[in-house]
Image (cartoon, rainbow, N blue to C red):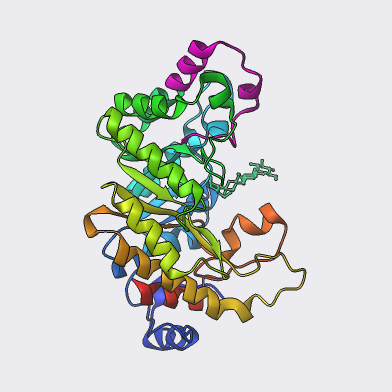
Amino acid sequence: MLFDYSKITTISLLILFTSCQPETAGPCTFEQALHGQAPYPLGFAADVAAFRFDPDYQNHSSFHFNSITAENALKMEHIQPARGGFEFVQADSLVNLALRKGMRVHGHTLIWHNQNPPWLSTFSGDRQAWIDLMKEHINTVIQHFSGRIHSWDVVNEAFEDNGDLRETVWRNGIGDDYIELAFQFAAEADPDAMLFYNDYNLWRKSAKCRAVLALAEHLQKKGIPIQGIGFQGHIDIRGPGQREIELALEELSALGLQVHISELDVSVNPLGKASPDLEGNFGKQAEVYRMVAEAYTSSVPADQQFGITFWGLADAHSWIPSFFNRADAPLLWDANYMPKPALCGFMDGI
Ligand code: G3I
């Protein structure tokens, strides 16, 4: 059974209402779009083909979300598959359709260690050649989408969990200052764009969280533009706890930057059990979603709330099962777009 938005009736609302009552969450109805429940934008990571060609995917996403991030289409392997050969067709189609649907488009991501084109790993050149290469990529992509994409994850996942800078092709080619150069080039390419640093495991005032704070302060001191921090938020039913989330969000908010929970999902099978009781963990999952939403509201000042983005639309689209080769159900709707307790939990926390 698929959810049909054109046929919302009292009976269907009643079924949805009763099918979505986690122990921890309050009443949950679907008379309004999910994004209408929050005072900040709510987004999802989109698969281009599904967003363009699957009507259920398109209807569900445009009904519930007012912000979109391309899950893969803007990454370098797709955008510059050959040296100097930029391919914008897929990304343009996603961006233009999203704008027609009234969504804000967030750009992910310009500089990363992963999903780079194969030619990049064999590129050889001195520091200046690498700087020129990075500048060309950033300039070309940002300027291509200028006026359509107003915010970018300029650098993604530059730190290890222990706070050390990650070894990447960019760092190897340029040096530790590749991050500040990337932000500088991005700001020059589009002075109106909002520039984010994006990373995971920032929840527990961790070593990585400290490193990100230090980076942002360093950029601010040098006058290099940075407007926001992306807290990815790939977490699971074991936590972290609400206070741990709040402390980290409070500290990052103190930078005065926008805070984006940029890739939220909550795994119900984090240990990768072969025959997991996924549904048995839906109540815990709802509680974690409630906690995250509540922590965001209580710890990030309203004018710094860039929004919350879920990493995928419904369970059938999550990256987790294929990436980790395990059964999982980390999102707010099941494979048939039926609401899960997670949806009520999240709405309860807003
Ligand atoms: O496009 C190819 C396809 O041609 C091929 O047939 C297929 C066979 O496996 O693979 C396809 O590529 C996959 C790609 O997703 C598109 O679906 C890759 O194998 C797969 O590794 C890739 O995974 C993406 C992952 O980043 C790569 O690191 C996930 O979709 C994407 O959700 C995930 O997103 C990242 C964020 O960008 C950064 N933060 C972490 C997050 C989760 O890993």
Q: Farthest residue toward the right?
A: 274
| Rendering quarter of residue 92 | top left
Query: Is 191 drawn above or below residue 295 in the view shown?
Result: above
| Rendering quarter of residue 26 | bottom left
User: What x and y, as percent, mark residue 255?
Assistant: 29, 46
Q: Residue sitting at 58 percent across and 70 percent down?
A: 238
User: What x and y, as percent, mark residue 142?
Assistant: 37, 30
Q: Residue sitting at 37 percent across and 73 percent down?
A: 349
Q: Is residue 340 visible?
A: yes
| Rendering quarter of residue 187 | top left
Query: Is 23 drawn above or below residue 209 in the view shown?
Result: below
Q: Residue sitting at 34 percent across and 41 percent down?
A: 151
Q: Quadrant of the C terminus?
A: bottom left
Viewed as shown, does residue 72 lie left or right of 309?
right
Residue 99 forms part of the magenta stretch: no
Q: Which quarter of the frame holds ligand 1? A: top right
Q: Between 307 and 16, which is closer to the camera in this rendering?
A: 307
Viewed as shown, does residue 237 lie left or right of 141?
right
Q: Quadrant of the N terminus?
A: bottom right
Q: How many marks?
A: 0
User: What x and y, as percent, mark residue 212?
Assistant: 43, 43
Q: Residue sitting at 53 percent across and 72 percent down?
A: 2
User: What x and y, as percent, mark residue 101?
Assistant: 34, 53
Q: Is residue 149 visible?
A: no
Residue 134 forms part of the magenta stretch: yes
Magenta part of the chain: 110-136
Q: Between 174 and 260, which is closer to the camera in this rendering?
A: 174
